[in-house]
Structure formats: C-alpha cells, structure tokens
Amino acid sequence: MDKKERAERKAFKDKVGEARYELIKRAKERITEAKDNGYYLEAITILESLIADRLESILAKSETNEKGFKALGRLIKKVKNSTTLDPGFKNLIETELDKWKDKRNQALHEMVKLEEGNLHEWDERYGKFEIEIKKGLDIFNEIDKAKKKLDRQK
C-alpha cells in the first residue's frame, strides 16, 4: 500500500490552501450538525481528523518535514519528542489532547464492551460524548491558533 503524502500550500491562497480551508470549514459545520442531532460518534471522528491535520501541518513546518498521514497517537508522540515546539503548546498536547484521545478511543472502540463493575447503559455512555466534543473543539481551536502563529513566523 502506498503511503499518502500530505498536500502542502505553496503560496498564500493557492488551490491547496483554498481546498483545505473549505474542508476545514465544512468539517466544523458538520461537527456542529452531528452534535446537534445526536450523532456524537460522527462528530468525534471528524474532530480527530481535523486535529490530526493541524498537527501534521505543524510538525511538517517545525522540524520533521514529514509529509505522510499519521494516526493521532503517533502525532502526539512526535510533539512530545519535539525540540523546537513551544513548551506551552507541547503541554496542551501532552495533557489535554492525550486525555481527549483516550476518551475518543473509549467512544469509538468500547461502546458495547462491559467492564467488570461498570455496567452503564447506552444512554449514560453515549451522553458523555457531548462533553468530549466540546473539549475536542476547544483543543482543535488552540492547535489551529498555534498553527496560524507558526505560519506567520515562517
């Protein structure tokens, strides 16, 4: 299987930049629609893609110059190991995003699994995800701010 390579913007408002802007705009709209209609797993999945995209961009511009797609867990590790990223940004990723990633994994991979001593019903489990969507959006916004700041510095 061929590795996918991330498309990079070459100039301000080029086709890649315009396409990425439109995708991000539509993704944020869809997250809101999905959340408002109770499709929390969809919203969480799109959020993960948004966050991963921003982290891939930051890492490509900071030190690694990697252009491939990466899973969220691998991206978090790369940020933790970075020697050039802002310490405040690294702290956000190491604490808030890492916790959110674990909640996302629970939502997507453990929805119908029963843990000994934890027999919560569907509505109770599912209802908790709305909170994680808000946290994910807050984290995305902070990462996006950091990405825009990095763009201005380059």
Image: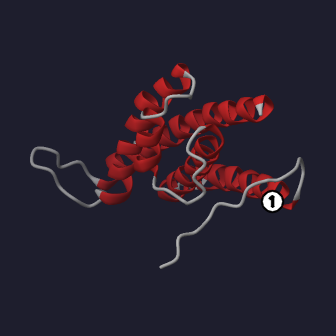
How far from the left and from the top, in percent, is residue 114?
17, 55
Q: Residue at x 56, y 28 (%)?
A: 85
Indicate the quadrant where residue 129 lies: top left
> Label 1 neighbourhood size at 10 Å, few (<14), some (14-19), many (20+)?
some
Q: Amino acid at mark 1?
A: Val
* SS label for mark 1: helix
Query: Left or right: where does residue 118 sit relative to residue 141?
Result: left
How far from the left and from the top, in percent, is residue 18?
85, 56
Indicate the quadrant where residue 88 lies: top right
Image position of 142 with respect to 129: above or below? above
Please state which of residues 145 and 14 is positioned toward the viewer in this rendering.
14
Name the residue furthest left: 116
Q: Residue at x 53, y 70 (%)?
A: 3
Image quadrant where one finds the C terminus: top right
Query: Left or right: where does residue 98 sit relative to residue 122?
Result: right
Q: Which residue is mark 1?
A: 16
